[in-house]
Amino acid sequence: MREMPHIEEIKDYWNMRANGFSMAVEEELKTESRKEWEQIFRENIEKENADVLDDGTGAGFFSVILSKLGHQVTAIDYSEEMTEQAKKRFEAEGADVLIRQMDAQKLEFADESFDAVVSRNVLWNLDDPAAAYQEMYRVLRPGGKLIISDGNMYLYIHDEEYARLHEKQMEEMKKKPETKVSLHGKYNVDHVDFSIIERIAEDLPMSRRRRPQWDFEQLISLGFDDIHVKFQGRELPMSFLIIAEKKEVQRV
C-alpha cells in the first residue's frame, strides 16, 4: 500500500463541504438522477435483500436509493462530518442504513462480506486508489457486483490533450442555463474554497491517469470478470460508469 500523505487534508476538505454537500444530495434525490440510478441498481443487483457496501457514501445518495430498493446497506466515509450528514439524511428519508467512519483504502470488514459494492466519485480523490480497488475485491463475495461512478476530475492539470477537451466542454456547459451553477456551487453555504481540493488533487495519482482505461486494467489484474464501461462517447470522458463482477469460485 502506498503512503497516504493527503488523507487528512482530503478529510478536512470534505468536513468543510459536508453541510452544503448534504443539501445538494437532498435536491438530487428529487431529480431524474435518482430514477436513473434506481434502474441501474435494479438491473445489476439481482439478489433481493442484498448486502451492499456504499464505499465512500458522502451524504448518502446511493445508500438512500439502495435502502429504498430493499437492500441491507452498510455505508462508510472517512469524513466525520459527512457521516453525520449522512445519518441525518437517512433519518429524513426513512432509510435503514448502517454507517461507519472508515478509510476506503483499508476496509475493516471480513473477506467476502458483501453481495455488491458501489462507489460514487471517490477513487479520484484517494492517495491509493489501487488499494481501494483491492479492498473492494476482497470484501465482495464471489459473483458479487461492483458498480463504480467516477471521472477524470482533475486530469486537465497534467494532460494537455484532456485540458483542451475539458476547456471546450466547460465552455459548452456554460451556454446551457441549467448548468451555469452546479448543485454543489448552488449549495456552497459555508463558502468553501473549491480550489483547495484542486491543489490537493494536483498531487493525487488519478490526476495523472487516463480513465476509465486505468480502472479497466486494475479490475482485470484483480480478477474481475464481465466488465462493462459506459461513458458519453468521448475518448477522454469527464465521467464514466463501470460495472464488473467478481468471478465465481470454480469447484472441481
Image (cartoon, helix red, strand yellow):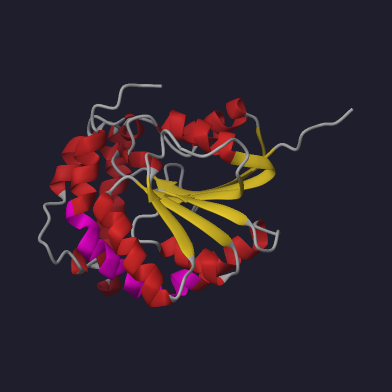
> Which image quadrant is residue 42 in?
bottom right
> Magenta region: which residues?
16-34
* Secondary structure predominantly adopted by residues drawn in magenta: helix
- Residue at image position (66%, 62%) is 43
Image: 74 above or below 113: below
Q: Is residue 72 left or right of residue 192?
A: right
> Which image quadrant is residue 205 in?
top left
- Residue at image position (35%, 34%) is 206
Q: Position of residue 87 (x, y in %)?
A: 35, 64
- Residue at image position (42%, 75%) is 93
Quadrant of the image containing the N terminus:
top left
Image: 36 above or below 126: below
**Residue situated in front as seen by the camera: 84 or 129:** 84
- Residue at image position (51%, 34%) is 135
Q: Position of residue 119 (x, y in %)?
A: 46, 49
Q: Is residue 1 left or right of residue 44?
A: left
Q: Position of residue 22 (x, y in %)?
A: 28, 65
Q: Is residue 240 visible?
A: no
**Residue situated in front as seen by the camera: 196 or 87:** 87
Quadrant of the image containing the C terminus:
top right
Image: 75 above or below 133: below
Q: Is residue 170 visible?
A: yes
Q: Is residue 183 left or right of residue 67?
A: left
Residue at the extreme top of the image, as rendered: 2
Q: Does residue 20 show up magenta in the picture?
A: yes
Q: Is residue 149 left or right of residue 78?
A: right
Q: How many marks?
A: 0
Q: Position of residue 226 (x, y in %)?
A: 69, 41
Image: 16 above or below 78: below
Q: Does residue 199 show up magenta in the picture?
A: no
> Which image quadrant is residue 161 in?
top left
